[in-house]
Amino acid sequence: MASAYGWLSLIPPIVAITLAIKTRKSVSSLLAGVFVGYCIYVWFAPDKSALAVPNPVLGPFYETIQALMLSFTDPESITLFTFIAILGGIVQILVVAGGAEAFASWSEARIKTRRGAQLATFGMGISILIDDYFNALTVGNVMQPISDRLHISRAKLAYNIDSTSAPDTILFPMSSWVATCIMLINPVLQQYGFPETGFPAFLKTIPYNYYSWLTLLFVVLVSYWDINIGPMVEFERAARAGYDGTCRETENEYAGRAATDKAKASDLMLPMLMLAALAVVFMMATGGLFSGATLLEAMQNAESTLALVYAGVGTLIFVFVLYIPRGLMTPDEFSAAFMDGLKDMIDAMAMLLLAWTVSKVMGNEVLATGPYVASLVPSETPALLLPVTMFITTGAIAFTTGVSWGAMAIMIPPSIAICANVAPETISMVLGGVFAGVIFGDHCSPLSDTTILSSTGAGCDHIDHVRSQLPYALTSGAVACVAFIFVGVVRHAVFGLAFGLALMWVVAFALHRYSDRIMSA
């Protein structure tokens, strides 16, 4: 569908993003974006009779409140909020019991350098492949004490987490992303008569998902060479001086509590391993693996967010049994710590609620921002430029709406249709461009849920994370554009990927030399 509001549909994300960067107030900026969006929706409605409240003053307030209530009461939202609250409580319990402090002490003999800590963060990130939400929140909370000890800024930690979680999830064939990708491409591929559908069709897109591959390589090179560009220079200098302005301050009675003599590194590691193991088990269970479904069917049908809630509850019980009998904390301390951790997550939940509401006002039922952006792609785009065009357009939609899967849903039908008419043989690279664009826009957008959760997991101010990550994401995106143009010429996945990885290494090496000069100045 086309947008009846045209370019006006771009105003809400522009307002929200600009205010967030200028004022550094994420919640109020997102709320402003929602309200402006519904002002446009009411004031410029092509059919006023379709509005519940057509009054130009009361209408926007009514629509805004309704949208917020719908976002808050959506079952998927409630489920994710429940998991975030449980995880926040678990993390605070680990801190109060001394597990986090013991883990940091244990790591001193094993992770002694900034390079080692950053590479360890990357390694942990790529090992949690099943879900990007789970990845972002878990890796951040585990690696915070190590990063703090080695004076790595929370902004750098957030970048490492964010730039690892979504890329490796979409590249891993058995993750929560894959089911959605297959579900979206299947009917359209069949509609246009493409012979390959389903899982085999998705597998063929993986070598063409250049942004994800390049971003993962860039994270490794940034970690190994300690590359700092843009606002990250400011945060890294502050961290090395012993102060990190991006740290989220905690003001509860347990902040800074030292580890007891009884606490061990395993008191942090075992709960996190339990959480990961239970998440996998419950994902398989909700997908029907234990009821006769195949592994692939289970991954496709898994209720990943609900599975995380089950895993969180199971881990909470496990931690209670692990800590209380050993005297690491009393039941009253356990309950108080859990509630303190839940409170720490309220800001993240508020930002998520408003980000989802912003995406709702830009959705197909209101302003239809995504379809408007998609309509700007010429149907006669040359085959040579199809992959890069789809990459840039999908990235723009994901950036403005902050919804990765929504951007895929918008761009997959027109991209396959154009491909079928212009160059059917390029279908895998075109879909690879769409999937890559989703991750690119997600990394750049302050409205993205994974961006919000990455900053939460790292304990970093959200806007600081967005500002400091943007130069890195744009660098990977620029190299990906060149790689997509190159593959449009050579039409060979391996050659295109090899070219992109080589170019990324060259660009990173140049930035490494530049970063060394800047940081030593």
Image (tube, rainbow, N blue to C red):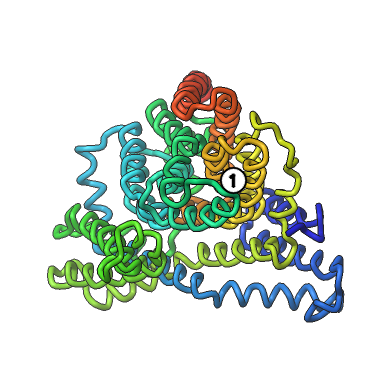
48 up-or-down from 268: above or below: below
Please tell me which residue lies in front, 166 or 406: 406
What residue is rendered at 44% in x and 57% in y?
A: 179
Residue 226 spot, x, y in % from top left = 42, 29
Residue 153 spot, x, y in % from top left = 44, 41
Residue 424 spot, x, y in % from top left = 59, 38
Q: Is residue 69 visible?
A: yes
Q: Is residue 508 visible?
A: no
The type of residue carrying mark 1 is: Gly
What residue is rendered at 40% in x and 64% in y?
A: 301
Query: SS of the residue at dot 1?
Result: helix
Position of 343 with respect to 367 (left or right) is left
Residue 198 spot, x, y in % from top left = 45, 52
Picture quarter with the N terminus: bottom right
Position of 365 with respect to 73 (left or right) is right
Residue at which label 1 appears? 441
Q: Residues within 10 Å of mark 1 (few under 14, many from 20)?
A: many
368 up-or-down from 211: above or below: below
516 up-or-down from 232: above or below: above
What residue is rendered at 66% in x and 49% in y?
A: 414
